[in-house]
Amino acid sequence: MKQIPYLHQGSKIAIAAPARMVTLEEMQFAINWLKERGFVPVYDNRLFAQHYIFAGDDDFRAAVFQGYLDNEDIEAIWLARGGYGSIRIIDKLDFTKFLQHPKWIVGFSDGTVLHGKLSRLGVPSLHAAMPFYFENKTPEAKHALFDALLGKPLKYEFSSHPLNRPGVMQGEIVGGNLSVLYGMMGSDTFPDLEGKILFIEEVDEYIYHIDRMMHALKRAGKLDHLKGLIVGGLTQIHDNPNPFGMTAEQVIAEAVAEQDYPVCFGFPAGHFDDNRPLFLGLESRMEVNKESSVFLGNLVH
């Protein structure tokens, strides 16, 4: 993995919307938060463009994002929000100049597309809360994001889950939103999972669809050679009037039942207020125990 400088007082952070449209009101808290911590938020009226559900049409969003990728003065790009849209522009982006001067790309959900691309390019990134609804994030999540941007090691301890498979996993984390990963399978933006720790989270899905996605990953051999599996938030999950008969957690546990690597449920990252950051592509360690789990991120500092 390439090394990227961490941020400092005065670092310029671009706020970009490669997917759904946003408003100034929705961004204002995050903009103020950056300023209060000594960073310089970079954006202009293009951030608030609208084209149906998107923040401008595909060419427009790609052009804005390309400008931030190429700008050597920008030290991080904070994805404004998720929704849908990054997969429509990822093949329009040229990462040539970016690779000469890589920077942190920060976000999650639909941003999984960009995380997957960066993983394939050998560039680490930061899976973390985004400006949209940032005001509602817990103090712990906000503080951890500030620490992560400065390059400080991360440590989380949380309660164990009955479906956990105890053990220790250490290595690079890849992944993100399960639906987005599923949609990228077979493409050059799907991350290489062999020898990696896979992280997944999901929101607003039916249990049967999670089952379908997990079986697709299993049948494609994507779950065979992991160092471990970390499952974050499974939020607003739905069932049909005729129940599926399993929870989302049980579906995921069943898909990896034949494997022997550690599995951790309930990691504090995903579509909820306590959305803690985790570095993708950097060395991390997870100790999964019966009573609690301990996560150590960014071990090489």
Image (spheres, rainbow, N blue to C red):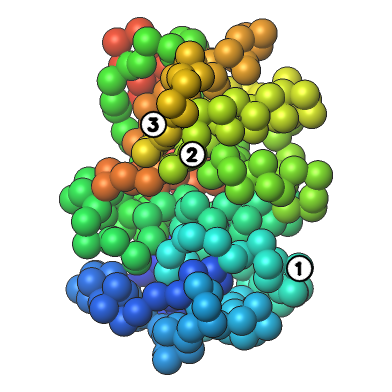
Mark toward the start of the polypeptide (2 vs 1): 1
> From this viewpoint, which residue is outermost toward the bottom?
45
> SS class of the residue under badge 2?
loop
Q: Nearer the viewer, residue 298 or 227?
A: 227
Q: Label 2 crowding class (10 Å Cα cut-off): few <14, some 14-19, many 20+?
A: some
Which of the labelled discs sits on residue 46, or is there none? none
**What is the C-alpha distance between the residues marked 3 and 1?**
31 Å
Q: Label 3 crowding class (10 Å Cα cut-off): few <14, some 14-19, many 20+?
A: many
Of the residues tagged 3 and 2, which is closer to the observer?
2
Give the residue displayed 31% in from the left and 45% down from the top.
272
Q: What residue type is labelled 2?
A: Glu
Q: Which amino acid does label 1 sit on?
A: Asp
Query: Is residue 142 among the parts visible in the rendering?
Result: yes
**What is the C-alpha distance between the residues marked 2 and 1?**
27 Å
Left/right placement of residue 183 relative to residue 125 reads right
Left/right placement of residue 87 relative to residue 130 reads right
**Residue linked to disc 1:** 91
**Residue linked to disc 3:** 267
Left/right placement of residue 253 relative to residue 139 reads right
Which of the labelled discs sits on residue 205, or is there none? 2
Q: Nearer the viewer, residue 13 or 130?
A: 130
